[in-house]
Amino acid sequence: MSNVATAERVTDPADAGPLLRVSGLTKRYGRITGCTDVSLEMRPGEVLGIVGESGSGKTTLLNCISGKLPPTSGTIEFNARRHGLTDIYALSEPDRRRMQREDWGFVHQNPRDGLRMRVSGGANVAEPLMNLGQRHYGQMREQTMAWLSRVELDLARIDHKPANFSGGMQQRIQIARNLIHNPRLVFMDEPTGGLDVSVQARLLDLLRELVRDLGLAAIIVTHDMAVARLMADRLLVMKGGRVVEQGLADQVLDDPQHPYTQLLVSSVLQL
């Protein structure tokens, strides 16, 4: 069996309860409201898609949930390995950063935002292991090679810097970097945006395989309803900073109830 097995999900007693609970989350920028009164709950292993047009509030919501942007009001509770179900903004800054390193991954739309461009692709993938205290070079390199292989990159290029890879390959390095430490939750912000259609298709297939094989929980922000259908178990549809519809992905996409969701779905069908 591949060494990737070391990163497979291990059954955790905490998996019995909710993984994430967001209650009444609101974020304002002065007089401008990014999102208003958003509540949701996720279970371990669930994939939640957040969809809507530009300016709908989906990225603001993602940034608040992922600890990048403190909300104006409301709570975000996460079932962390060290703390259990805890309001992430009630944690001290060092504890929150440690939780982010241990329990979370974040895949950016632009892989350069999630990679260190001055070190090799292999060093990028291994860095989360070092941040968690691993120091055995041979073991880290072995795990790194296993993950580079899993995201279908040529192992002969392990010591090449990210600038020497295409955008699609850089995204694969970023994915491996964010999964190698066995996170409980992965945030993905338009993970295939900006890539060629053929590259998008294979990368989406790879992401779906990894999420299902590892039993990962993920929150995916996208404006692409095809991506939402392929990846998500449940959907939140946002407009003007509010959730206008939510439910099982197939149900929302096949029988949309809100006029805005109907418009989004019909725009895809007309392409």
Image: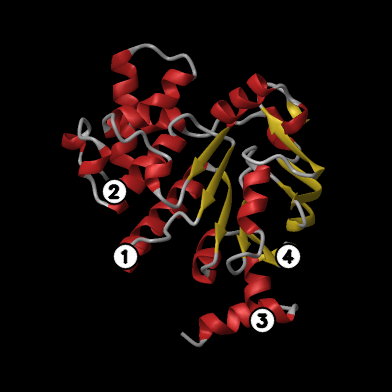
2 and 3 marks in contact (CB < 8 Å): no
Q: Residue furthest front?
A: 30
Q: CA distance from mark 1 to mark 4?
A: 30 Å
Precedes in sequence: disc 2 or disc 3 = 2
Q: Residues within 10 Å of mark 1 (few under 14, many from 20)?
A: few
What's the residue type where badge 2 is placed?
Met
The colour scheme applied to this rendered structure is: secondary structure
Q: Quick one: label 4, few (<14), some, or many (20+) residues within 10 Å?
A: many
Residue 260 to residue 85: above or below: below
The first of marks 3 and 4 along the sequence is 4
**Cα distance, mark 1 to mark 3?**
27 Å
- Residue 160, given in percent of the width and then of the height, sits at 20, 34
- For the residues labelled 2 and 1, the Cα–Cα distance comes to 12 Å
| Type of the residue with mark 3 | Gln
Relative to 151, 55 lies left or right:
right
Secondary element at tag 2: helix
Q: Earlier in the sequence, mark 2 or mark 4?
A: 2
Q: Is residue 160 left or right of residue 243?
A: left
Which residue was labeled with disc 3? 262
Decide if residue 7 is in sight here. Answer: yes
- In this figure, which residue is indicated by the disc labeled 1? 196
- Looking at the picture, how far across and down is residue 142, in whole percent? 29, 24
Q: Which amino acid, mark 4?
A: Gln
Residue at numbered disc 4: 246
Give whichever of discs 1 and 4 has the lower sequence position: 1
How many other residues sit within 10 Å of disc 2, few (<14), some (14-19) or many (≥20)? many
Which element carries disc 4, helix, strand or loop? Answer: strand
Mark 3 closeness class: few <14, some 14–19, many ≥20 residues within 10 Å: some
